[in-house]
């Protein structure tokens, strides 16, 4: 499968100031040319970037208008070191970008950390200062329920008082080792994927901010009740595609989702934490079916 190179990812990026920070974002070529086509917003996970979606992006671009961004502290966006990172601020950044681009309604395809941002956006639906309407949300593996999120030892270490030291000694080899644990044994990341993901972390001295970004674990506990209530009560179509071999948010998260969410629409995949990279064609196929179902 042809992968998007780091250099091309950089060349295709646009940037704008949102909430006082430079944020990298991408739009499909037809974004301003065909207002009849619906918009899909991609929201990436921790610790990666919008690069994760390159396969789905390429194949969804024809029939849809596409938008993605590297959230604050990730990828090509600003990574301020003396900053208190928050999922609520990330949602503010997304809303400012939607407003700046004149987006009135949109679908969401989210993963991991991005799931939490999507949950916050959903909980804001109907507020007068939030005019953009969510048409649907498709969640990939993520901590949708704080009670069932199982962070890795590495994440716990980075979040602890030793986080600065742990991030200092983090390197491409340790990233590879960590990703080998969360990808399925049958769909391990290749050297090129690890190289690009590492370059995205290192960009703008990003290793330093990893411990601060992990505040999202506490925020999930803090805001989880409101988020889950919005998922239960919403009329927005929801879909959960879950890689069941994910030790962080796999089968156990899927089971709880099916227990909690009314008329749950879900699919289990024989992969790990990164379905969009481990089974890109399958994720694309399932997402296209979901879009067709809710559009008809």
Image (spheres, rainbow, N blue to C red):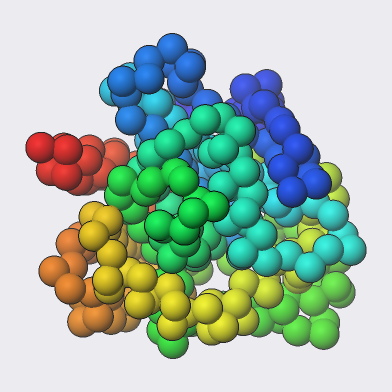
Nearest the eye: 20 or 142: 20
On the picture, is 35 further left or further right than 182?
left
Q: Quadrant of the N terminus?
A: top left
* Above or below 1: residue 50: below
Nearest the eye: 218 or 181: 218
Please state the horizontal and vertical placement of residue 56, each as a whole percent of the image: 38, 35
Nearest the eye: 60 or 205: 60
On the picture, is 136 further left or further right than 171?
left
Nearest the eye: 143 or 66: 66
Please state the horizontal and vertical placement of residue 57, each as a whole percent of the image: 42, 31
Q: Which residue is painted at 73% across and 75% down in the image?
A: 158
* Above or below 190: residue 120: below
- Residue 218 appears in the rendering: yes
Residue that protrudes farthest toward the front in the picture:
128
Q: Which residue is painted at 67% across and 71% down in the image?
A: 214
Q: Which residue is painted at 27% across and 71% down in the image?
A: 233
């Amino acid at each position: 499968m042809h992968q998007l190179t780091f250099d091309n990812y950089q060349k295709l990026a646009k940037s704008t100031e949102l909430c006082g920070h430079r944020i990298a974002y991408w739009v499909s070529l037809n974004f301003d040319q065909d207002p009849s086509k619906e918009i899909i917003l991609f929201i990436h996970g921790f610790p990666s970037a919008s690069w994760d979606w390159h396969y789905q992006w390429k194949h969804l671009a024809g029939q849809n208008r596409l938008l993605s961004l590297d959230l604050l502290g990730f990828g090509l966006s600003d990574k301020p070191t003396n900053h208190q990172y928050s999922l609520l601020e990330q949602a503010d950044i997304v809303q400012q970008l939607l407003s700046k681009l004149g987006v009135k309604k949109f679908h969401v395809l989210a993963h991991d950390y991005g799931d939490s941002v999507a949950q916050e956006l959903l909980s804001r639906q109907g507020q007068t200062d939030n005019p953009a309407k969510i048409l649907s949300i498709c969640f990939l593996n993520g901590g949708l329920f704080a009670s069932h999120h199982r962070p890795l030892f590495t994440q716990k270490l980075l979040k602890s008082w030793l986080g600065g030291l742990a991030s200092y000694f983090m390197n491409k080899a340790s990233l590879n080792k960590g990703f080998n644990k969360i990808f399925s044994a049958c769909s391990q990341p290749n050297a090129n994927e690890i190289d690009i993901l590492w370059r995205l972390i290192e960009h703008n001295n990003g290793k330093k901010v990893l411990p601060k970004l992990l505040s999202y674990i506490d925020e999930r506990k803090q805001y989880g009740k409101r988020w889950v209530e919005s998922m239960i009560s919403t009329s927005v179509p929801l879909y959960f595609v879950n890689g069941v071999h994910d030790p962080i948010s796999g089968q156990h998260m899927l089971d709880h989702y099916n227990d909690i969410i009314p008329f749950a629409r879900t699919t289990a995949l024989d992969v790990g934490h990164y379905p969009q990279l481990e089974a890109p064609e399958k994720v694309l196929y399932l997402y296209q079916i979901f879009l067709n179902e809710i559009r008809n």
